[in-house]
Image (cartoon, grey):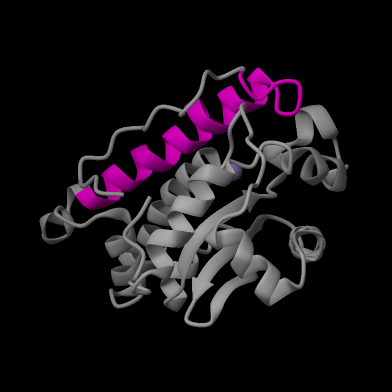
């Protein structure tokens, strides 16, 4: 994403109730208008005393944070990733899912996972394996798409990877509707994935394999 300091909360790409009945309006309100907004506010607070970081985008901040003294680097990494991760999570969903179709991304999934179903099973297993809070990620590596998990607000950019999509499995993502049943939330989430957006991201990242400077 191209925004820099001072950051403002990016609106959802669909109406707040649009993902019902799978993700309810109240969950989206707390998740976007409250929690993600808090990450934006905290990031701005941290950056207010660091004018040397004011022209950096979120992914530049994530890449830079680990080189800074830990007193600023750790909270900066958490806040910048907290904003980035949520934007990508929200952008990766749509109330108007189109069929996966036949495109470069699906061909890559077939090549590396054998079939879309096998990819889906592996990604679901990864998301279920996150202990406590965190995310399952699909990243674009030199050899193609790869699944990884990170706890809390970890972001693959810090490890030199390019994120394609992510699934938030913090309990606040699903607890109001699904209680402790993460597997049911993940099952419904597959019906919300925005394959057009994911395919565009993958195609852009895979062509030239540049470091992520999106979304
Ligand atoms: Mn969250």
Q: How far from the left and from the top, in percent, is residue 45?
A: 28, 44
Residue at coordinates 77% horizontally, 28% vertically from top-left? 176
Which quarter of the figure has residue 57?
bottom left
User: Residue lying furthest front in this view?
Assistant: 102
Left or right of 21: which side holds 207?
left
**Residue positioned 88% across, 42% down in the render:** 181
User: From the viewer's perspective, is residue 129 above or below residue 173?
Assistant: below
Percent x, y of residue 29: 57, 23
Q: Residue at x 70, y 49 (%)?
A: 169
For this view, does 128 lie left or right of residue 59?
Answer: right
Q: Is residue 105 above or below residue 95?
A: below
**Numbered range of the magenta stretch:** 18-47
Q: What residue sits 47% from the left and 37% below the top? A: 36
Ligand 1 quadrant? top right
Closer to the camera, 175 or 10?
10
Main SS, magenta residues: helix
Compared across the picture, whether 44 is left or right of 136 comes to left
Queried whether the magenta region covers residue 30, the answer comes back as yes
């Amino acid at each position: 994403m191209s925004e820099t300091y001072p950051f403002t909360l990016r609106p959802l790409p669909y109406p707040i109730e649009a993902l019902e009945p799978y993700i309810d309006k109240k969950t989206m309100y707390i998740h976007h208008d409250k929690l993600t907004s808090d990450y934006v506010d905290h990031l701005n607070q941290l950056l207010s005393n660091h004018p040397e970081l004011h022209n950096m985008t979120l992914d530049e901040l994530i890449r830079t944070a680990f080189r800074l003294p830990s007193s600023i680097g750790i909270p900066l990494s958490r806040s910048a990733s907290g904003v980035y991760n949520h934007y990508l999570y929200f952008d990766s969903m749509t109330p108007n899912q189109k069929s996966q179709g036949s495109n470069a991304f699906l061909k890559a999934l077939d090549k590396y996972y054998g079939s879309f179903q096998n990819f889906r099973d592996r990604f679901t297993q990864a998301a279920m394996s996150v202990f406590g809070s965190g995310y399952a990620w699909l990243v674009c590596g030199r050899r193609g798409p790869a699944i990884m998990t990170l706890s809390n607000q970890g972001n693959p950019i810090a490890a030199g990877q390019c994120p394609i999509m992510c699934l938030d499995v913090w309990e606040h993502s699903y607890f109001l509707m699904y209680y402790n049943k993460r597997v049911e939330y993940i099952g419904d989430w597959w019906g919300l994935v925005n394959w057009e957006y994911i395919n565009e991201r993958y195609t852009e990242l895979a062509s030239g394999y540049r470091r992520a400077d999106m979304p």
